[in-house]
Image (spheres, rainbow, N blue to C red):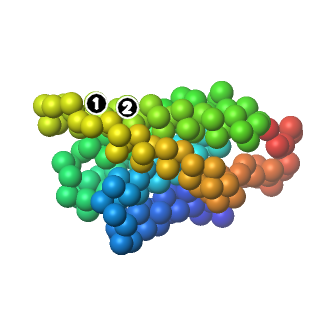
Amino acid sequence: MNLIRAMLPSLALMVLMVLCIYPWGLATQARNMLPLVPLAAIIAMNLRLARAVPEWMAFCVGFVLDAMSGGPLGFWALVSLGACVLADQLAPNRGAALVGGWALGVVSLAALSVLQWVLVSLYTFALTPVAPLMRATAVAALVFPLVDVLLSPLTRRSALRDNGYLVRGYPR
């Protein structure tokens, strides 16, 4: 049972990634937001429970996004890995407040969009326009609370240990 519970965040992330690869008939400007949804999921799950999504899974999700989007291999893999590490580092600072976790998630998304802009500018050897990335980040920031609420049952701590005894001080 604990193995299945540990795998649920990664499985949900893979399903979300597959859903975000398909363009869904959106305009070209709106398609920039779709890869940010799995990043929001990585951040949300790792802010709720540290290391809910392991680094290798975040890297694999980013690599598949790279392969399916036709972009340079390693771009989304690096950004996804950055999302995972950033959320793991910020997880102890989350506290119990729901809005505080959402604020950390939005700040994390903003930091990752700066990383995206730097990587794209380095890849093209030119300063890329910031407006499309800002719009995509704003939409992802608005979607973040919804992603966080929908994925929260997957990253709840269990009140029981592996041996069946109650954990003192639950919930933390």
The percent coordinates of residue 65 (x first, y second) are 31, 56
Q: Is residue 62 above or below residue 112?
A: below
Q: Nearer the viewer, residue 107 or 134?
A: 134
Badge 1: residue crowd in 10 Å (few <14, some 14–19, many ≥20): few
Drawn side of residue 122 relative to residue 2, left or right: left
Quadrant placement of the N terminus: bottom right
Give the residue at mark 2.
114
Q: Type of residue at label 1?
A: Val
Instruction: Give the SS element for disc 2.
Output: helix
Give the residue at mark 1.
118
Kindly tell me whether residue 44 is visible in this rendering: yes
Instruction: Give the SS element for disc 1.
Output: helix
- As measured in the structure, the alpha-carbon distance from the residue carrying label 2 to the one carrying label 1 is 6 Å
The percent coordinates of residue 130 (x first, y second) are 32, 36
Q: Type of residue at label 2?
A: Val
Kindly tell me whether residue 7 is visible in this rendering: no
Quadrant placement of the C terminus: top right
Residue at image point 54% right, 32% down: 107
